[in-house]
Image (spheres, rainbow, N blue to C red):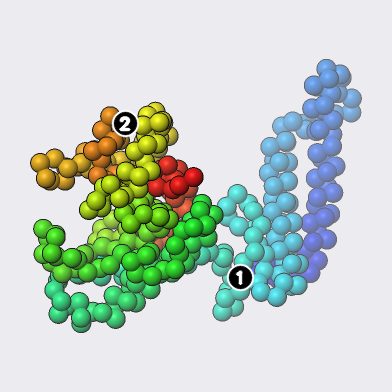
Amino acid sequence: MNTYVKRGEGGLAVFLRKLCVLCGEILPWLLLRRRRRLRRPAYHAKTDILRRSRAIRLRIRRAIRAAANHFALAVACQHPSGHVELTSQRNRVGLCARHHGSSHMAQSEPIITREAFRFFRDLARNNRTEWMQANRERYQECVVQPLRRLCEELAPTVLRLDPRFETSGRTGANLSRINRDIRFAKDKTPYRAQMYVKFSAPFGGEGEAGQLYVGISTKTVTAGFRIYSGSKRKESALAQIADARVEAKPRWLSQQKKRLSRRYESYWYSVEKGEWTKHTGWPVAENWKKLQGWIVRRELSTAAATRGSFCKDLGGIFRDLHPLLRFTSLQD
């Protein structure tokens, strides 16, 4: 704002005078161009007008920029919370907030910080109950609180997709548990070095249903859609909803592959000889009934998660993949 004040109170009048001079140069040039298009003789046109057209256009752009800056100064004097200035992006005029006597473009602050990834890396190296107890406050501050805030920020987006989504931010409903159930896991370490924010489809049965999710681990961030059969496939949304729909519309899977495969990774699981087997690529209708899990996701960098635009990026991913959740998990 100080840069505008230095221009003086008479700066706007000077600008208007310059603009009038420029108009006197522009009008003959426009007249010449019009007569050339109409193939008429160019009466009273100066011979050097076309040679100076580039310089004139440059002066016009500078004059417009000066007008925008003077407009910013005028509005800033009246605005209670900040001032307006010409931004660097496409020469737009935007409102800037006043902060400790200086101005900055209004940007959303990042929710996830590097401390979350650092915590997961430390946990992976020290996956013991004693270490976790000693770092419980750090876990709450760096991981749980930011993920709850992320859930709050994403809630309006997912509720626009379906108002029945659970968005309370509770552990279990929207936040995954960091404790590992070692009774059925091959990995016997007590904690997972990753956590998820998830929005589950409202399903009337007792089995599993599809989810839109974002996961944060030691080195990567993933976001997308996933659905699992759970311990009893017959009670899951895969069996009660998706099986009949895939049978009625076998081309639906190939249509989704065509729509999403360039931007998203897909893989699915089946059970073979009592073991879960991962298959890369998109499932086909012929193999659907033996499908036990399906994930469509995009992998993001840790830097992407620490940007202010992270929630907006996730909103775009959720909108892309919500049709998968609706088809496989939601009743009509």
The image position of residue 57, as x and y in percent, is 71, 41
The image position of residue 117, as x and y in percent, is 28, 65
Residue pictured at 32% horizontal, 53% vertical = 208
Proximity of marks 1 and 2: CB atoms separated by less than 8 Å: no
Residue pictured at 61% horizontal, 70% vertical = 97
Please state the total of marks drawn on the protein image. Answer: 2
Identify residue type, mark 1.
Answer: Ala
Q: Which quarter of the image is occupied by the N terminus?
A: bottom right
Q: Is residue 32 above or below residue 72?
A: above
Q: For mark 2, give the secondary structure.
A: helix
Which residue is denoted by mark 2 in the rendering?
A: 285
Q: State how far apart marks 1 and 2 are (Cα).
A: 55 Å
Residue pictured at 79% horizontal, 69% vertical = 9
232 horizontally vs 160: left or right: left
Disc with the residue nearer the chain's start (1 vs 2) = 1
Report the front residue among 63 and 151.
151
Q: Residues within 10 Å of mark 2 (few under 14, many from 20)?
A: some
Q: For mark 1, give the secondary structure.
A: strand
145 horizontally vs 286: left or right: right
